Image: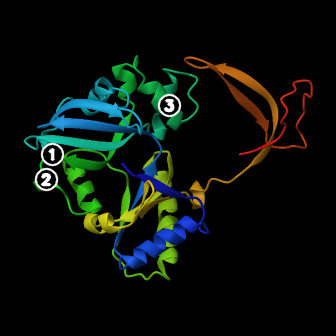
Amino acid sequence: MLSILTVKSWAAPELTKFIQSLGHLQSPPLFFSYKINGHGVRVVYKDGELVKATSRARASAGRDLTRQMRNILGDHNSGLAGWGMVEVRGEVALPTDRLEAAREFNSEIKSAFTAVSSLIKPSSTLEENSLLEFFAYGMYFENRENVVSSTEEEYGKLDSCGFSTPVYFVTDEDYTQASAEGMLKSIVEEAEEAYNDTGLYCDGIVVQINNMDTFSAAAIEGKYSTGNVALKVGVWEQNLYAGVVQTVVWTRGKSKRSPVAIVSENADEAEIDETKGFGINSVTN
């Protein structure tokens, strides 16, 4: 499975490459959706029965989440009855207005994103799982006759089967390679204005060619397609910051201890304990 290329500024060369790809493919219609920051999950149905769910992993089969996903989605989806084997991919996320309810189960939860790990852990209960929602964005069919022709159509089919999908925008407006960046900025501005209404923690906007055949015709470079990008710009821009390491705390993991740096963002206010001897007292992340 290909990864999606992340663009972190409007001046990034990756964005230029994406826009050039659009030009080579004769400026196809584009599909935009919020990039929900949750936990990626695959859910497999057979004739509408949920038979298997796993976390999405690159180098392994993923962690079994069948019980948890049945608690979230139920055992049966009548919209998929008679379709044979269908894999649905998406993100499990916690709506931000349920954060305080999640903290009743674990007071150490810091954010809607970190809450997901706690609420879906192996020992989690039905009550914990029920706070989460699954947002579907992809369907993969055993029966090729059911394959959709565009991402917009795919989202429509997911909606018709009762799945929640990320909020999305589709543009059919004419644009050229020269005007593409301005069009992308306009869409991102619209997405920024509507972001708070999603009620979710998102970390960007996914832009992809809407037509699946056209998307498949886009070039592959390494592990990325040039037919889509994740825009982490505007309110989602990930700025670099500098700080001073105050100390290093060794935290216990499952099989070993790992160093965690405690950083002060203001070097003028930092108090350095030079007796620690860590060797490095400044860091840029």
- 283 horizontally vs 45: left or right: right
Observer-nearest of 157 and 244: 244
Circle on res. 144: 2
- 91 horizontally vs 111: left or right: left
The type of residue carrying mark 2 is Arg
Dot in front, 2 or 3: 2
- 62 horizontally vs 235: left or right: left
Q: Is mark 2 on a helix, strand or loop?
A: helix
Circle on res. 115: 3
Observer-nearest of 163 and 254: 254
Judge the density around disc 1: few (<14), some (14-19), many (≥20) Cα neighbours within 10 Å: few
Q: Position of residue 44 (x, y in %)?
A: 23, 36
Q: In this view, does 50 lie above or below 251?
A: below
Q: Tell how many labels.
A: 3
Q: Residue furthest front?
A: 222
Kindly check if marks 1 and 3 are in contact, taking CB atoms under 8 A apart as contact.
no
Q: Position of residue 199 (x, y in %)?
A: 45, 46
Circle on res. 142: 1
Quarter-of-image position of residue 119: top left
The type of residue carrying mark 3 is Ala
